[in-house]
Amino acid sequence: MNTLIAVLVGVLFGAGIFLMMSRTPVKLIIGLVFLSNAINLLIFDAAGLTRGIPPIIATGAETMAGSSADPLPQALILTAIVISFGVLAFALVLFNRTFKSLTARDLNELKATDT
Amino acid sequence: MISTAVISGFALALFAPAIHRFKPAWSGGIFALLPLSLFVFFFSCISEISGGVEIVESVSWAPQVGAAFSFYLDGLSLVFALLITGLGTLIIFYSGGYLHGHPNLGRFYTYMLGFMASMLGLVLASNVISLFIFWELTSLSSYFLIGFDHHRESARSAALQALLVTGIGGLALLAGLIMLGLAGGSQEIYQLLGQEDIIRSHPLFVPMLILVLAGAFTKSAQVPFHFWLPSAMEGPAPVSAYLHSATMVKAGVYLVLRLSPVFAGSAAWHTSLALFGGVTMITGAWLAIVQTDMKKLLAYTTVNGLGMLVFLTGIGTPLALQAAVVFLIAHALYKGSLFLSAGVVDHETGSRNVRELRGLYRRLPLITIAAVLAGMSMAGLPPLVGFIGKELIYESVLSAPGPGQLAAAAALLANALLLAATGVLLLRPFFRRSTAETDSDSGHRVSIDLWLGPVVPAAAGLALGLLPGLLSGTLVSSAATAVAAKHVEVHLSLWHGITPMLVLSLVTVAFGCALYVAYISKESLVDRWRWLGSAGPDRWYAVGLEALKALAHWQTRLLQSGHLHHYVLTIVLTTVILTAVTMIRLKGFLIPSTDLDVRAYELFIVILMILAALVAVRAKSRLSAIVAMGVIGYGIALIFVDFGAPDLAMTQFIIETMTVILFVLVIYRLPRYRSISGRGSRLFNGVVATASGVLMTCLVLVAHGVREGSRLSEYFATNSLLLAHGRNVVNVIIVDFRGMDTLGEITVLSLAGIGVYALLKLRPHAGIKGEKKQSATSELEQESTDN
């Protein structure tokens, strides 16, 4: 399964970067979403996959069972998901604003600092 | 004690503006007290140092790289320290009168004292790294001094020129000094001085030599770097006097003298010094004669003097080094006096033109005496110290190894030209009968702070000429001993009897007088040579600077095209190429066993996601792209569920839903999907994107092989319940173990939220109504045409 996820990460990365190199604003933002998803998956996969058992200490036990999933990458990814949502929301509104003010449909039109 | 002497200058420099504001009328005198007391201190060291004692002080700084603030006082450093503090005293005192009432005088003292302290640090530094630091500090403070009248464009560009030329030389010097330290196994100069055999046989010897000489030659204005020195005349007179007599330009001379014991014996060292020095001394003297501005004329005679010093170091016999030390002292004294005199002339008459000025002896009698004494010393006439220096120079070139006649001829030519230049500087401006109108203000009284500066060094030159014994036994012999690395007996006197040197001196005087007479009678012919000063290296500098700017502009336009996709492309391509090349070169792509334990539903999810990614890439409408994006988001959530991460799955579900909602809300306000990029560029982008995807896949596969058990995970798993009383380990990490990180994350999110709110509420300012209307209509258009 590790190998399959690795292929998936590559596909998402390639798709994200392809979309980010586009000159259409919406594609750029969708590419950004792809990229952050790909990276989350990368961390998840690179840290090792464990089927089934979540990192939760069972009732009665004092420590986590040895066969549980690794909690550390999960904590990292949890943070990353939320932060990338913040970035996405900001980017989306920023492009919306830019388009409203400048009516630029092509990112190449956004070259100068002054409007 | 030595370190205190250096630091005190910097300390006083910091408070100079405040002190000046407190007592503006006396400030020159107050500040002169510091160099005066330092001069007294160094003077009191003479007997100890000439007894053969060397003082070493060290403060550790960065021992890992062998850098220390260590100071070292021997005969050579002492001569320089005395000149720096002695002339410093007079020049700072003089500045108070010369720049009286100048609004930035307080700042001027800061620069001046800072410069003095840097120079003192430079000649006293023992560690090569601290020597370099002080070297650069002198460049930096001279930049402020030369550009003191910063409202003039010419002053600014002259300051920049000096900074660039000496700064680039300084970088070469740093490289050279580091090599020297590596070769000699120590960063301390006094330890390196004993290692000359090891250093000379080191493979880096020649590059080291070239780099050190590049530093010294740029600083000491040797041809072809001499052009910055006359330009630096843009600074006020005290600055020129200080920079050109005892400090700044002498730093390079100090360096070659200081390192002479290490490099001496190698033919490359002697040849290059003698060659560059010889060319420089003749060029300087020749260009001096054709000048009409007193300060420019003096600047070129400084070039001559520096060339002479380097030339003598190149000859390198004990006699030549002794001549170099005597000439160094003589030059500092007469040059300081002459620059300050020129400053007084400018201050009192408003002109420095040697063709226009006349009859100055009536108006400025005291200055005339000082200038004549100093001028006689410069021309090498008895009974001044300059004469003793010149006799020694002739003696050393006559006994020099190698082509002695050539050296003697070069020295003779340079000295004769210098004598003629002295005549141009002094005879007509001071002694030609003035026309009637300027006679009226004869006997003008000059205040003490203006006349003391020119008079004292000129008088010192006379005193040392009459009583050379003051110098010979102590200072000169210990300095020459330090440079020659063996004991040098020194006996100086004015009269040696009829010797070859005396004959050469007489020839020099006769030749120099003939040149002067020729100059007077053929003035127009002389003028034709003036272009030489601005041609050559000065022109190259301007062209080089323009070319550098053009290059900077071109590469900025290339890298900063302003197109976002260029930036993304550059970043991605660089990453892919660098990573791939490194991995292939180090044979890093060793993919461990592939893990193909896949269940049917997992395979289904992954294939669905890959298809969705392809759909998103190929999508023709915004909506299908968003749907594809949603599929991928939820697919990831399912993977999280499958592999024991319910918290991640929940978060991913929520966030993905919000993302899709957000997109649907905003999407119809954004321009619709269009294919703007051409086929070719899309194909190219596709190749780059595919390459990056493949690289990432390979990296993830490689990462599987290097995984090690994390001690952190172990710690969290064991202590989650015991320490933090929570059973969900992921939650405990986020809210407890790494609580501060989560606080940071919340802050980032709130800032993003504020940003979003502000952007939504922002109204384009009222001034651009037309634009607003236009955007509104285009939005309508958008909505009506979109499906």
Image (cartoon, helix red, strand yellow):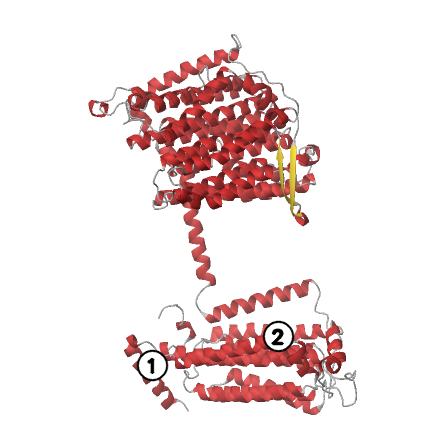
- In this rendering, the answer to whether B120 lies above or below B587 is above
Instruction: State the image quarter where residue B46 is shown.
Output: top right
Q: Is residue B444 visible?
A: yes
* Quadrant holding the N terminus of chain B: top right
Front residue of this view, candidates B554 and B656: B656
Question: Disc 1 marks which amino acid?
Answer: Ser
Which residue is tagged 1?
Answer: B775
Looking at the picture, how far across and down is residue B657, in whole percent? 54, 89
Judged by depth in the image, the label closer to the viewer, 1 or 2, is 2
Residue ranking furthest to the top? B498
Identify whether B615 is placed above or below B276.
below
Residue drawn at (42%, 79%), measured in percent from left and top? B759
Quadrant housing the C terminus of chain B: bottom left
Q: Which of the 4 quarters of the picture holds residue A41?
A: bottom right
First in residue order: circle 1 vs circle 2: 2
Determine whether B238 is above or below B548 in the image. above
Q: Nearer the viewer, residue B750 or B315?
A: B750
Instruction: Inspect the image, locate mark 2, and give the three-letter code of the amino acid beneath it.
Output: Met
Q: x and y percent of residue B680 in the render?
A: 48, 73
Q: Which residue corresponds to the image point at 63% horizontal and 66% vertical from the top-left? A: B579
Image location of residue B626, percent across then percent down: 51, 87
Q: Chain of mark 1?
A: B
Residue B740 is marked as: 2
Residue B630 disc label? none
Pick the front one: B111 or B542: B111
Label 2 SS: helix
* Residue situated in front as seen by the camera: B75 or A74: B75
Residue at 56%, 74% in the rendered image: B689
Left or right position of B673 against B592 = left
Q: Secondary structure at mark 1?
A: helix
In the displayed structure, B166 sits above or below B291; it is: below
Label 1: how many residues lie within 10 Å, few (<14), some (14-19) or many (20+)? some
